[in-house]
Amino acid sequence: MKDTQQAAMRRKFLDEYSKTLDIKASAEAARYGKKTGAAIAQNIFKNPAAIKELIALCEHKTDHLEVCLGYIISGYLKVLKWALTADEGGKPNDPALALRALEGITKQLGSDFACSQAPPANPEPELPIITEIKGLDTDKI
């Protein structure tokens, strides 16, 4: 009986931890003692079976997560706006982050577009519209 009770407490701890990433609050929710909760949590994270259980629990939760495409794109747009905002010296905050945000937006928009179209019957390689941009250093991209 003690083993099943410990397993249930560990499961409750891992479930709470997957929601909050707060060890102390998760230990309290699993009804571990205040003095021993942190030590027990550290031991749980040393156990490979518990780590596998936590990963499986997180994967299960993300499988059922439904996030609107507009929400994801709006998040990328906020990042893009911040990255391109000029700092005190007049330079953008983080141009590399801006490029990554643009890449994320295009991937999100392209994934719907690519899934909605049937592949062409006779695929031919497409040539890029712009073959060269003067002054562009490809090593910095």
Image (cartoon, rainbow, N blue to C red):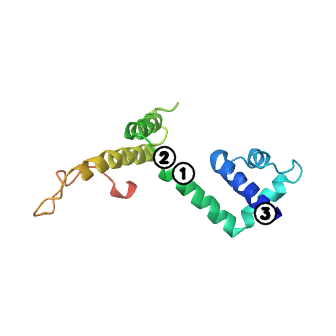
- Neighbour tally class for label 2: few under 14, some 14-19, many 20 plus, Cα within 10 Å: few
Depth check: give the residue in front, 131 or 81. 81
Q: CA distance from mark 3 to mark 1?
A: 24 Å
- Residue at horizontal 25%, vertical 52%? 114
Quarter that holds the C terminus: bottom left
- Residue lying farthest to the front in this orientation: 1
Query: Mark 2 sits on what residue?
Result: 65
Q: Tell me the tag on residue 87.
A: none
- Neighbour tally class for label 3: few under 14, some 14-19, many 20 plus, Cα within 10 Å: few
Which picture quadrant has residue 11?
bottom right
x%, y% of residue 54? 63, 59
Which numbered disc flags the more N-terminal residue, 3 or 1?
3
- Residue at horizontal 45%, vertical 38%? 75
Is residue 28 toward the left or the right of residue 137 in the image? right
Is residue 36 toward the left or the right of residue 27 in the image? right
Depth check: give the residue in front, 120 or 128. 120
Residue kind at label 3, given as amino acid type: Asn
Secondary element type, mark 1: helix
Residue kind at label 2, given as amino acid type: Leu
Is residue 18 toward the left or the right of residue 35 in the image? left
Q: CA distance from mark 2 to mark 3?
A: 30 Å
Query: Mark 3 sits on what residue?
Result: 43
Secondary element type, mark 2: loop
Residue kind at label 1, given as amino acid type: Lys
Query: Mark 1 sits on what residue?
Result: 61
- Residue at horizontal 63%, vertical 62%? 53
